[in-house]
Image (tube, grey):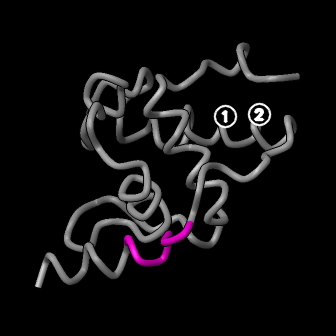
């Protein structure tokens, strides 16, 4: 059953070939959101808390599509909520790609 759910979630990102262009103002909003909202559970430095660490090292080898699907759909049975109401698939993919690279601090996002 779990494999089916993962396949379904990943299917929602099928064909995505990299992040859509996210304008600098939206990048700042998303960075602030990750640092504040996600940081509430994943730690202010994204090094873990109620939720697991979201550092580059912790996410090494994790598929970007799977991370984006988790952001959009959440993880049923865990405290991880779905963010579909606030984020597009492109937003989620941009966040996942930034997490995989080492998430920027707000001051380092394009202005």
Residue range highlighted in magenta: 10-15
Q: Position of residue 66 (x, y in %)?
A: 36, 58
Q: Is residue 11 magenta?
A: yes
Q: Position of residue 58 (x, y in %)?
A: 25, 29
Secondary structure, mark 2, is helix
* Mark 1 Cα-neighbour bin, 10 Å: few <14, some 14–19, many ≥20: some
Q: Are marks 2 and 1 in contact (CB under 8 Å)?
A: yes
Q: Quadrant of residue 74?
A: bottom left
In this rendering, is residue 16 above or below 30? below
Residue designated by label 2:
28
Q: Is residue 93 magenta?
A: no
Secondary structure, mark 1, is helix
Q: Which mark is residue 84?
A: none
Give the residue furthest to the left.
1
Residue designated by label 1:
32
Query: Split into 4 quadrants, where in the image is the N terminus?
Result: bottom left
């Amino acid at each position: 059953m779990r494999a089916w759910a993962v396949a379904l979630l990943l299917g929602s990102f099928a064909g995505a070939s990299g992040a859509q262009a996210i304008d600098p103002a939206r990048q700042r909003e998303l960075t602030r959101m990750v640092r504040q909202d996600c940081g509430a559970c994943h730690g202010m430095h994204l090094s873990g808390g109620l939720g697991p660490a979201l550092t580059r090292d912790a996410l090494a080898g994790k598929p970007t599509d799977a991370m984006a699907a988790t952001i959009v759909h959440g993880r049923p049975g865990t405290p991880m909520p779905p963010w579909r109401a606030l984020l597009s698939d492109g937003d989620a993919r941009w966040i996942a790609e930034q997490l995989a690279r080492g998430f920027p601090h707000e001051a380092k996002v394009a202005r």
